[in-house]
Image (cartoon, rainbow, N blue to C red):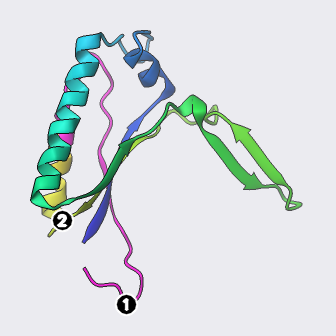
Amino acid sequence: MKYLVMVQGSQADYEAMSGKASAHSPAWGEKDVQAMFAFMASLNDELAESGEFVDGNGLAEPARTRHVSRDENGRAVVIDGPHGETDQLLAGYWVLDCASLERVTEIALRIAECPQPEGAPEYPIVIRPIQEAAGDSA
């Protein structure tokens, strides 16, 4: 079965990774960022070798987000940047093809071990099964 595994973050987290501390997150140094990328690359390599990796990417900072909807009259409404009331947004994801929910949970626990500076916020790793289309088989 395929699963979407999601990590969350905020604009403050992206700024912290650029070296700008806030009340929300300490500043990351170059070594912190390199450790995170090395961890993620190693994990992705392991998942590719096991045949479980389908796709995965980190996403650009929330400030580069665009929301598209329609108003009550059907007119397009386009808003750049994250909504002010939204603190956490999707920061990155993996699409994994795993034999069981238990296996994808093991992987999520590994993701939660990603190195980060002390005091950085920790977000839950979110797992969602991907609905298969009628006629598809795993």
Q: Identify residue type, mark 2.
A: Cys
How far apart in space, not on screen, are marks 1 and 2 (Cα)? 19 Å
- The residue shown at (15%, 68%) is 100
Residue furthest to the right: 73
Query: Eyeballing the image, is 82 above or below 3?
Result: above
Is 121 in the magenta? yes
For the N terminus, which image quadrant? bottom left
Query: Eyeballing the image, is 116 above or below 136?
Result: above
| Residue 132 spot, x, y in % from top left | 37, 78
Q: Earlier in the sequence, mark 1 or mark 2?
A: 2
Q: Which residue is mark 2?
A: 98
Q: Which mark is residue 135?
A: 1
The reply to whether residue 90 is visible in this rendering is: yes
Q: Secondary structure at mark 1?
A: loop
Query: Eyeballing the image, is 55 above or below 41?
Result: below
Q: Main secondary structure of the magenta part?
A: loop
Q: Which of 134 and 73 lies nearest the eye of the viewer?
A: 134
- The residue shown at (24%, 20%) is 34
Question: Which residues make up the magenta segment?
Answer: 111-138
- The residue shown at (41%, 88%) is 134
- The residue shown at (29%, 63%) is 3
Is residue 60 toward the left or the right of residue 83 in the image?
left
| CB contact under 8 Å: marks 1 and 2 | no
Q: Identify residue type, mark 1.
A: Gly
| Residue 71 spot, x, y in % from top left | 82, 55
Residue 14, by quadrant, is top left
Q: Residues within 10 Å of mark 2 (few under 14, many from 20)?
A: many
| Residue 31 spot, x, y in % from top left | 23, 13
